[in-house]
Each structure stands twice: as C-alpha cells, then as structure tokens.
Amino acid sequence: MWGSIIGDIAGSVYEHKDEKARQVVFFEEGAHFSDDSVLTIAVADALLTNKSYADCYRYWGRRYPDAGYGKFFKQWLHSDAEAGQSFGNGAAMRISPVACWFNTLGEALAEAERSALITHAHPDAIRGAQAIAASTFMARKGATKAAIKDYVQSAFDYNLNFSLPQLIEHYTFDSTAPGSVPQAIFCFLESVDYKDALTKAIIIGGDTDTLACMAGGIAEGFYGGVPQELIDKAVALLPEEFVAMISQFKEKAGV
C-alpha cells in the first residue's frame, strides 16, 4: 500500500502542468494525497472488516469529499445508485490491497473484479483493475518482469511495447483505464528501482498521480518495499487514520 500512496503523493504536484516534468522532486512543495489514496484506504478497510465495498467507498469518499474524484465516481458517491459504469482508471488505482490480501492469482483477479464492479462496471475498467492487481501480485511473488509483461499482454490484450522517449514527447492526459493502465505497467517494467518507477510514471505526464500510484504499487512488490525516508515523509502528509489503517492492514496481510 505504501508504494501506491507514496506514488499518488509524489505525482500530485505534476498533474495538469503546462510542461512535463524534466526532473522529478519527491514531495515537492504542495504535494498531497488525492482520491487515489483515499480509495486505496477504503479497499483495505473493506478487506479488513468484511464490510461492503460500496459502504467503504462511500464512507471514506464522503469523509474526504475534496480529494479530486472523477466525474462519474463523484456522481455515484453522492447518490444511492447500486453501481457506476465508469471506464476510468479509478478501479485500478485503488487495487493494491487486493493484490496483497490473497494467496492465489485467481483469487486476486476475482476480487479485483468484485471491487471494481461497484463503481467501475465497464469492462475496460474491470480489465484495468485486474491488470494492475495481477502485475502487483506477480511482482510480490517473485515473477520476472518478462513474465509479468507476457501475462499482462496475453491475458488483457494490452500492448506494452512503448518507447519511453515517445511517451515523454507525445503522451497526453488520459484518465481512462485503457489509456493509462498499460502506460503505468510499462513505467514499472522500464524501472531499475522503486523511485525510478515513480519518476518514469511522472515524466511521461498526464494523470501523473494515478500513473505513479499504479506503477508504485507494482514496484513496491517487485523491489521488496519502498525507502523508509519516503514513508516518513508521507506519514507527515497523511491523516493519522490512514497511517493506522496501513499499519493494521500490513499486519493482517503479512506484507
């Protein structure tokens, strides 16, 4: 979870910039958590307490109403609708706890779909959530980058054969699952360590907090954690109840 939440905070100050970041400074002035972190906490809460995803999303979303939710999620959040049809990347950005909670890939994929259906019932959104969950699960279990890439391309029909220089030059803001999940996975695949995964996810531009959140969750699993100094800085920017939830989740999940 730390990998995703720190990615969210790190990317927050680079989103909607006129120019893409050429040099990334972690926790630059103004860095903050967003809806990515709030809803990651909500997923962890649902898994820990066995409450419904709908109840947890609404509880945490309404508790932090100004975290920057997408249009369709915000409409669902303040309604009594049973499900939302968004095809955005919101189901994928919050999925890291699912990848840490289950012991088999099949269980993680099934739960990723279940967690998505409440607000992101569009097939593209479900596929995005499952792709990030699978990448994170496999990374945690010691799969090679080549194995992760092959699985994601075959199972989800994603093309991961990007060029980093071309993404930096041409990639634009895209908060849909098909337009951001493959790019986030690619940034992880091209990285050499956790910080590098976040840096690459940020310098391509666009939805930088969510790209770094998704890439960061995978990278945390693959590289065996995140630097403690980043955790310490994140703690200072997060509500105490977030930090407590992360600690409780890590203890229960054994991660």
Image: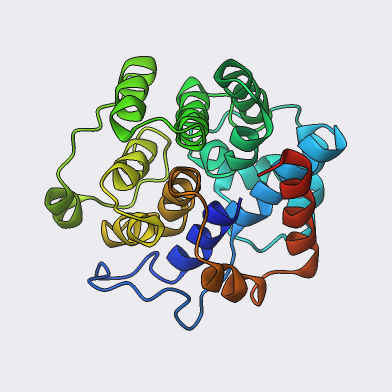
Q: In which quarter of the view is residue 25 placed?
A: bottom left
Residue 7 versus residue 104 in the image, above or below = below
Q: Which residue is drawn at 66% across and 48% down?
A: 39
- Note whether residue 79 is visible: no
For the residue pair 60 and 85, the one nearer the viewer reads as 60
Q: Which colour scheme is used?
A: rainbow
The image shows residue 198 at horizontal and vertical percentages of: 38, 58
Write the residue at 71% across / 50% down: 41
| Position of residue 12 in the picture relative to residue 113 (left or right) | left
Tally the numbered discs.
Answer: 0
Question: Can you see residue 21?
Answer: yes
Nearer to us in this view, 77 or 42? 42
Residue 99 placement (x, y as % from top left) = 59, 34
- Image quadrant holding the C terminus, namely top right
Tell me which residue sits at (64%, 40%) in the image: 97
Direction from residue 41 to residue 70 in the image, left or right: left
Tell me which corner region of the image, top left, top right, bottom left or bottom right, holds residue 66.
Answer: bottom right
Pick out the residue farthest to the bottom. Answer: 29
Measured as percent of width and height from the top left, residue 249 is found at 75, 47
- Residue at 53%, 44% (x, y): give it: 93
Horizontal and vertical percent for residue 171? 23, 50
Residue sitting nearer the eye, 254 or 67: 254
Residue 41 sits above or below residue 28 on the image: above
In the picture provided, is 131 more to the left or to the right than 187? right
